[in-house]
Image: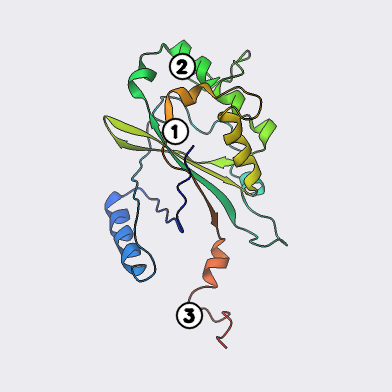
C-alpha cells in the first residue's frame, strides 16, 4: 500500500457540482501563496449508498449519534474535537470483479450483495473478517466512488479518534496480522495512502484574522 502523504487536504462536499467547482477554484486561489495543487479527485454518490462493487458501503458504521465518540478526540486532550483521517484511493479491476458470480462476490465481501447481511460462515479472508470493527475498533467511514467508465474505483475515507485502529486494519487487509490477506485486495489496487489530522471547527475559527479571541502577535 503506497504512502503518498501531502501537507494538506481540502474536502468539499455538496449536491451541486458547479458550486463545488467554483469553491474549489476559490480555495486554490486563496492558498496560491502557501501551497500548490498536486492532486484533485472528483467523486459522486452511487445508487444511494453503494460503492462501485455494487455492495452497500458503511454497513458497520456507528450511528450518527454514536459516531462522535469513535471519530473525535475527547475533551481534555490536545486536538479535542478533531479527528484522524485515513485517505486512500483504490482502483477496481472491473473486468475480473464482474466476471465473478454474485455468490463468489459475497464470499469475498463476507456480506450479501442485496441487503448487506453478514454471512454466518464467512471466509477468514473475506473483507468483513479482515476489517472486523469488533476486533480492531470502531471507525466512521464515508467512502466515495471516483473515476470514469473504464477507469474507476473507491476513495476510502475513514475517521477515528486514534490512528491505531486504522493502521491495524490496513495491516490485517495486507495479511500482516495472521498471514491471511483480504480477498478483496485481489480485485482492487491501492494507488494512494495518507493520514491527516482534521481540526475541529472551533479550532479553525481561532485562526481567522478577525477572531477577537485570537492572541495578539508579540
Q: Residue at x 59, y 57 (%)?
A: 82
Q: Residue at x 26, y 53 (%)?
A: 18
What is the total number of numbered labels drawn onto the structure image? 3
What crowding class fits label 2: few (fewer than 14 Cα within 10 Å), some (14-19), or many (20 or more)? Answer: many
**Circle 3: element type:** loop
Mark whose residue sits in front, 2 or 3: 2
Q: Is residue 8 among the parts visible in the rendering?
A: yes
**Circle 1: element type:** loop
Q: Earlier in the sequence, mark 1 or mark 3?
A: 1
Q: Is residue 65 among the parts visible in the rendering?
A: no
Asked if the residue under mark 1 is in contact with the one under mark 2, i.e. CB atoms within 8 Å, the reply is: no
Query: Does 151 sit above or below residue 211?
Result: above
The residues bearing labels 1 and 3 have C-alpha atoms spaced at a distance of 40 Å
Give the left or right position of residue 178, taking residue 84 as reference.
right
Q: Earlier in the sequence, mark 2 or mark 1?
A: 1
Asked if the residue under mark 3 is in contact with the one under mark 1, i.e. CB atoms within 8 Å, the reply is: no
The residues bearing labels 2 and 3 have C-alpha atoms spaced at a distance of 54 Å
Quadrant in which residue 179 is drawn: top right
User: Which residue corresponds to mark 2?
Assistant: 105
Q: Earlier in the sequence, mark 2 or mark 3?
A: 2
Residue 26 drawn at (x, y percent) = 31, 64
Quadrant in which residue 138 is drawn: top right
- Taking depth in this image into account, of 206 and 63 the one nearest to the observer is 206
User: Which residue corresponds to mark 1?
Assistant: 49
Residue 29 drawn at (x, y percent) = 31, 67
User: Which label number is shown at residue 210?
Assistant: 3
Amino acid at each position: 500500500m503506497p504512502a503518498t502523504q501531502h501537507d494538506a487536504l481540502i474536502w468539499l462536499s455538496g449536491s451541486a457540482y458547479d458550486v463545488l467547482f467554483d469553491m474549489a477554484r476559490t480555495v486554490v486561489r486563496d492558498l496560491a501563496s502557501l501551497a500548490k495543487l498536486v492532486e484533485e479527485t472528483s467523486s459522486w454518490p452511487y445508487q444511494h449508498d453503494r460503492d462501485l462493487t455494487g455492495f452497500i458501503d458503511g454497513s458497520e458504521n456507528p450511528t450518527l449519534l454514536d459516531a462522535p465518540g469513535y471519530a473525535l478526540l475527547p475533551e481534555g486532550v490536545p486536538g479535542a474535537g478533531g479527528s484522524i483521517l485515513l485517505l486512500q484511493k483504490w482502483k477496481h479491476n472491473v473486468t475480473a470483479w464482474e466476471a465473478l458470480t454474485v455468490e463468489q462476490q459475497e464470499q469475498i465481501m463476507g456480506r450479501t450483495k442485496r441487503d448487506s447481511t453478514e454471512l454466518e460462515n464467512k471466509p477468514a479472508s473475506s473483507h468483513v473478517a479482515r476489517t472486523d470493527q469488533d476486533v480492531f475498533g470502531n471507525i466512521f467511514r464515508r467512502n466515495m466512488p471516483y473515476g470514469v467508465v473504464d477507469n474507476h474505483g473507491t476513495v476510502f475515507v475513514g475517521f477515528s479518534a486514534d490512528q491505531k485502529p486504522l493502521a491495524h486494519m490496513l495491516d490485517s487487509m495486507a495479511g500482516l496480522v495472521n498471514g491471511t490477506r483480504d480477498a478483496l485486495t485481489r480485485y482492487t489496487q491501492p494507488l494512494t495512502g495518507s493520514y491527516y489530522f482534521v481540526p475541529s471547527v472551533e479550532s479553525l475559527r481561532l485562526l481567522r484574522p478577525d477572531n477577537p479571541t485570537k492572541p495578539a502577535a508579540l
